Each structure stands twice: as structure tokens, then as C-alpha cells.
Amino acid sequence: MANNEIRALITLIDDPDETIYTQVRDRIVQLGDDIVPELERAWEIDDFGDLFRNRIEDLLHTIHLSRVTDRLKAWHEAGGDDLLEGALIISRYRYPDMDEQKVKARLAAIRQDIWLELNDHLTAFEKVRVFNHIFFQVHGFKGNKRNYHAPQNSYINEVLDSRKGNPLSLAIIYQVLAEDLNLPMRGVNLPNHFVLAYLDEESIGGADAGQQGEENVLFYVNAFSQGDILGRNEINEFLAKLKIEPRPSFYQPCTNIDIIRRQLNNLANSYAKMGDSERAADLEKLRDMLGRTEGNAG
């Protein structure tokens, strides 16, 4: 579309006739990314009043949300194999200008530090102790207990900056690093909490570690508590305190799609607690696009 046509559309944004504006809005949203720079320029420079600015803000948000939705849908339809990709898409919702390469570089640096201390002669417990030392002591990651429900605890770019997160975000970063290091660790969808399972490498063989049952789990790791190692008994005690009946899904690895769905659920709950109903509604729509889950926030 020619620039003069784009400018013509922008001048109609504050048209008082709702029918005209609806047509203009639909066309602008259809243009998507191509018109974003002009919308941003108009918001900053053109002084056409509050209606004009409010409608531009709505248009920019709608275009951005559509972009995130399309990318998440494609990730889901491709099987959700790349957990990091899924988490980055969610971060894009709040941080459209996020530098994904910067996030990946930070993760690569942490991975390198862990890799230098690992070797094939270590047991599974020893590998996790090495991992925990580098991740928690050297790089300083910890659970954000003081501001537990804050949305920033769920965006991995924020967690990498602050080194503080909730059980799920810390476990996502932990799992992404573990996968890069060929450590068979996958998330476990507990109610009100989230842990990781270390799987028996010999029993899973070449199968997908994310589709294994409880019989393949050697032990569990709590990333929110400095990597504490847990057994089935600790999981049972946790469920008993919540007065929740055990289910097989509470002991076995979940899928990456389950993890990202829960991340969206956490964020929707966080924004709802803040009174930000618009963002909560956005994230609920993204969550429901991936299907519903039994897991609670955490």
C-alpha cells in the first residue's frame, strides 16, 4: 500500500461515524506490521485529540496481540517441541521490542558455566548438585517470595534480568538449560507448585523424555527452593497439606504445551489480582487457544 493511502487511513481514525471507523479499523488491522511505524509516528507527532490517540493505542495493541497469537498458534501446531520458543512468545506479549538474541546469549553463558563443571562420570545426583551450584550460587537465581504474584516473575527475560522468579519460570529456565546439556529433566505440573523430574536415561532410551511416566522418574527438583531434591514421599506430603487427592499427572512429566499454558494462566491470574482486566482477558484467550489445564497457578 502506498504511503499516501496509509496516511489517508490514519486521518480517518478519529472519524465520529462508528461505521466508517469500523471499516478503517478492520483495514488497518489487516495491514498489520506494515502500518505500525506510521501509527506510532502519528501517536507521537499528530495532535488530533484523545479519541485519536486512544484509538491508535487500541489499534497497536490489536495488531501486536494478533502477531503474538499467530506465532503461538504456529508453535502449538508444530508440536511445541521448543520450550524456549514458547516462553519467548509469551514474553513478546508484554515486551514487543525484546531482543531475543540477547536472551539466548544470557542462557548460553549460564549453560557454558554449567557445562564446564559437568562430566560423564558424575551420577544424576552429582550432575544436579553441580547444576544447582552454578545456577543458584554463582548466577544467583532464587524464588521471589516477597512479590510472588507479580507478572514480571513469569516473563523469562525479566527473570534473567532480576534473577528472581516463580516456581514455573525458574523451572522453565532450568529445563531449557538442562535440555541443552543433555540432562533428561522435564516439568511436573503440581497443583499450586511446579517442579522438575530427573528421568532415568537408560530406561527412556531414544524416546521423548516429555512423554514418560512416573516409573522413569529418578527424583524431583524444586527450582523455587534452590534446587532441593525431592522423592515421591515429599510430593505426597505436599498434596496432603493441600488436601488434594494424588493423580498420576502429579508425578510424571508434562508437555511443553502444558507448561506454556500454565505460564499464561499464571499471568492471567497475576494481572487479574492487579485489576488489569484487559491484559488478563488477553492472556486467558491465549491460554484457551492451547486448551484447558487442571493445574493451578504457581
Image (cartoon, rainbow, N blue to C red):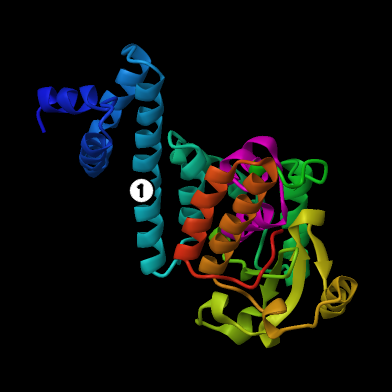
Tell how many labels. Answer: 1
Residue type at mark 1 is Ser
Secondary structure under the numbered disc 1 in the rendered image: helix
Q: Which residue is drawn at 67% across and 45% down?
A: 153
Against 215, residue 48 (above or below) is above
Instruction: State the image coordinates of residue 87 (x, y, percent, origin top left).
Output: 52, 53
Q: Is residue 123 visible?
A: no
| Quadrant where the N terminus is found in the figure | top left
Instruction: State the image coordinates of residue 236 (x, y, percent, origin top left).
Output: 85, 78
**Extreme residue in the front direction:** 17
Location of mark 1 (residue): 66
Q: Which residue is drawn at 34% across and 54% down?
A: 70
Give the class, few, some or many, for how many residues have Cα within 10 Å of label 1's Cα (few <14, many ≥20).
Answer: some
The answer to whether residue 43 is left or right of residue 17 is right
Against 165, residue 39 (above or below) is above
Instruction: State the image coordinates of residue 63 (x, y, percent, origin top left).
Output: 34, 41
**Magenta stretch containing residue 172, yes or no?**
yes
Q: Can residue 256 be seen in this view?
A: yes
Where does the magenta region start and end? 152-178
Q: Quadrant of residue 101?
A: top left
The answer to whether residue 262 is left or right of residue 9 is right
Please state which of residues 280 and 170 is positioned toward the viewer in this rendering: 280
Q: Residue at x 44, y 64 (%)?
A: 289
